[in-house]
Image (spheres, helix red, strand yellow):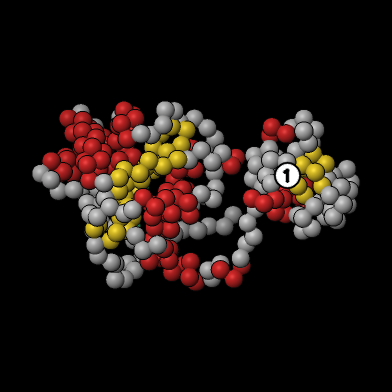
Amino acid sequence: MSLFTVSDACNGCGLCVAACPASLVRQAEPGARPEPLAGREAHCILCGHCVIACPTGAFVHELLPAKDFEPIDRKRLPEFDAVRHLLRSRRSCRTFDPTSVPREELLRLVEAVRHAPTGHNARQVGYVIVDGPARMDVARQGVLDWMEMEVAAKSARAAELHLGGAARAAAKGKDVIFRGAPHVAVVHAPDTGITPALDAAIAGAWLEIVAAAAGYGACWCGYLVFALDAHPPLGTLLGVPEGHKGYAALLLGRRAARPLAIPPRDMPPVTFF
Ligand SMILES: Cc1cc2nc3c(=O)[nH]c(=O)nc-3n(C[C@H](O)[C@H](O)[C@H](O)COP(=O)(O)O)c2cc1C
């Protein structure tokens, strides 16, 4: 099977050749009809860039039917200033309304970030969304067990994260772990692979942004990520698939209070080389 065909509408511009990250699209000479690099079909990462680069619609990918491509509505794209304002006004939420968010809403947020980039377009990121107070109690106890283990071992992490105080507060019922959030989304990816930790972190970052855009509160939950790393059975308990690891965790829910201003943040150092 040929990976792609190119119709007579091709103008020989070569944009598909330039767009393919795996160099699987070749032209014998400038202006020639592109051809697949023979025997290398399995190297295609199915990114679709060859198809979307073609200005004449001549490029047909065997595995990516044209009907699955969605036109870009440029009028709906936000302006730079609107994106900048959203990013600046997004804030970690630590005052949640404990009411659960309907699953359709949570799925709507995940659906919105399914185009988050992944190394080699691997798209193996998945989500476990802890849903409701009883399940949050199970997850919280898992984190508390990890905190107590680190404190008992007098570990460097216990000192660095002041886990003694956090564990004491949590044991007394102050929810320093989940901040009263009704959900936590664990973003998982294979524990081997090209860029699983980055893929999950990017997906988590995107999820935080769309949660803000949709009016929800979110906060990264480092404690849960540390606990999952130190104690893999906790991941299994929460439903993280075999062979995957939870690399990011995001508390989610409705905000009980809204931030009223944007706190100052320095411009990070930038150097040009
Ligand atoms: C990787 C990561 C882990 C975090 N873990 C926690 C956490 O366990 N608990 C918490 O309350 N905030 C956590 N935060 C939130 C940070 O404290 C917060 O981003 C920072 O204070 C800046 O506040 P802002 O997000 O409102 O700008 C985490 C943030 C990141 C990026």
| Residue 197 appears left or right of 62 | left
The residue singled out by tag 1 in the image is: 61
Q: Residue furthest left?
A: 172
Quadrant where the N terminus sits is: top right
Quarter of the image where one finds residue 255: bottom left
Quadrant where the C terminus sits is: bottom right
| Residue 199 appears left or right of 239 | right
Badge 1: residue crowd in 10 Å (few <14, some 14–19, many ≥20): some
Look at 64% across and 45% down and name the residue there: 47
Number of dots carrying numbers = 1
The residue closer to the viewer here, 266 or 239, is 239
Look at 41% across and 63% down and name the residue there: 213
In the image, residue 272 above or below residue 34? below
Look at 82% across and 47% down and name the residue there: 6
In the image, residue 153 above or below residue 222? above
Across and down, in percent, residue 91 comes to 34, 61
In the image, residue 97 above or below residue 84? above
The residue closer to the viewer here, 162 or 231, is 231
SS class, disc 1:
strand
Across and down, in percent, residue 266 comes to 39, 63
Report if residue 205 is visible in the image: no
Report if residue 82 is visible in the image: yes
The residue closer to the viewer here, 154 or 192, is 192
Across and down, in percent, residue 237 comes to 30, 31
Across and down, in percent, residue 163 comes to 20, 40
Look at 70% across and 50% down and name the residue there: 66
Q: Amino acid at mark 1?
A: His
